[in-house]
Image (cartoon, coloured by chain):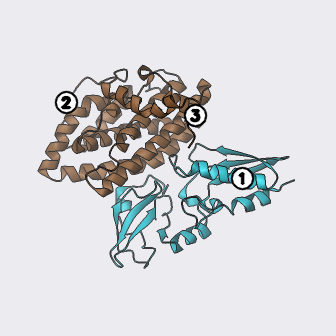
Chain colours: A brown, B cyan
Amino acid sequence: MNSVPQRSKAELLLELADDELILGWRDSEWTGIAPFLEEDVAFSSIAQNEIGHARALYELAARDLGTDADALAFDRRPDEYRCAPLVQLRRLEWARTIARHWLYETADAVRIEALRSSEDAEVAGLAGKIGREETYHRLHAEMWIERLLAAPEGRARLEEALLELWPYALGVLEGGLREAFAGLVRERLPFSLPEVVAIPRDRHETELGELLEEMTIVRRSAPAGAQW
Amino acid sequence: MVTEEAVWEALAEIPDPELPVISLVDLGVVKSVEIEGKRVTVELTPTFLGCPALETMKGQMETAIEALGAEPRVDVVLDDSWSTDRITPAGREKLRVAGFAPPAPRSAGPTTLVQLQSKAFRCPHCGSTETRLDNIFGPTPCRSVRYCESCRQPFEQFKTI
């Protein structure tokens, strides 16, 4: 793991968990309103998986930090969340949603593959599990890339969306992992993406504050625990 | 004192919360059973990490173990030890009879688009392999939706994990 800059195991797990939780939330915003039924089902299902991954990652981090998964997911201050700006962006139009989906899944695959060979058996084991589930997300994203690249209008819209999101996507990873990710993206596309400065993790979009406000409302209104 | 065999038998009586035709033991999610005096420790491996049935499964297992007069402890294992290959042959047959196509065996590498779009998947209704992928995602994380060109029925195909 020498390609990932120095941070503690818990910090690394929180970055991953925050990415998956916030993207899961964003994906769930398509439930009921995706352009057609299959995509409504797909994005709802992907959202459910991402939030499941976040929960497992928070549980591992919580063991190190002496807290619990819910506290990590809901009780931190907005400035303590470590999710990449790419996942913070709110309900993008469809081409941008697909572009983000593909960029994120490609980056996540690079990261998960690296974590599978972690010296920490718990991290490696969980990464193996997450990787198997994410395979289906990647295949779904790849089908869309094929579909969009097959016709001039789709290709133009995808290109525009990727150009806009490229600096955000580069901010998901650092060092050698970022380079590996950028290589995979460039290799797949029939057009080029510029050299740009990555938008780092410590930047918080205003949309994130709004999301957290909504996401934590039940927790804040029933601090002792909601009963269903 | 409760025996390991009695615990396995009790767990084999618990239906999967979402697919009651198959038991938790058939599903292969019970990784191990250990007995120390009155304490029974069971390792439960989630199918998918986001499966909402996980808490229900855990609760049902605890209840079944308590009914044997033992103290349950159910540990959820967060690793890659569950695979659709762990579904028992009896479990696969029960799924097929209920109209769900059982998962293909896990291959050496990750699943590819070519595999998903191939005709290797058999319709559980008519047995034809003239089927196509309709949606990678279905009503639960563990299933895809396919369509049979022969009997013109959609069906749910278990994803290989």
Asked if labels 2 and 1 share a chain, the reply is no
* Image side of residue A185 versus residue A55, left or right: left
Q: Indicate the position of residue A20 as horizontal and vertical percent values.
A: 43, 37
Above or below A2: residue B88 = below
Amino acid type for the residue under numbered disc 3: Gly
Asked if labels 3 and 1 share a chain, the reply is no
Residue position marked by numbered label 1 in the rendering: B63
Amino acid type for the residue under numbered disc 1: Thr
In-front residue for pair B31/A46: A46
Residue position marked by numbered label 2 in the rendering: A194
**C-alpha gap between disc 2 and disc 3:** 48 Å
* Image side of residue B130 versus residue B27, left or right: left
Q: Chain of mark 3?
A: A
**Front disc: 3 or 1:** 3
Seen at 36% across and 54% down, the residue is A41
The circle on residue A225 is 3
Q: Chain of mark 1?
A: B
Q: Chain of mark 2?
A: A
* Residue B19 seen in render: yes
Disc 2 is placed on an element classified as loop
Amino acid type for the residue under numbered disc 2: Pro
**C-alpha gap between disc 3 and disc 1:** 23 Å
**C-alpha gap between disc 2 and disc 1:** 59 Å
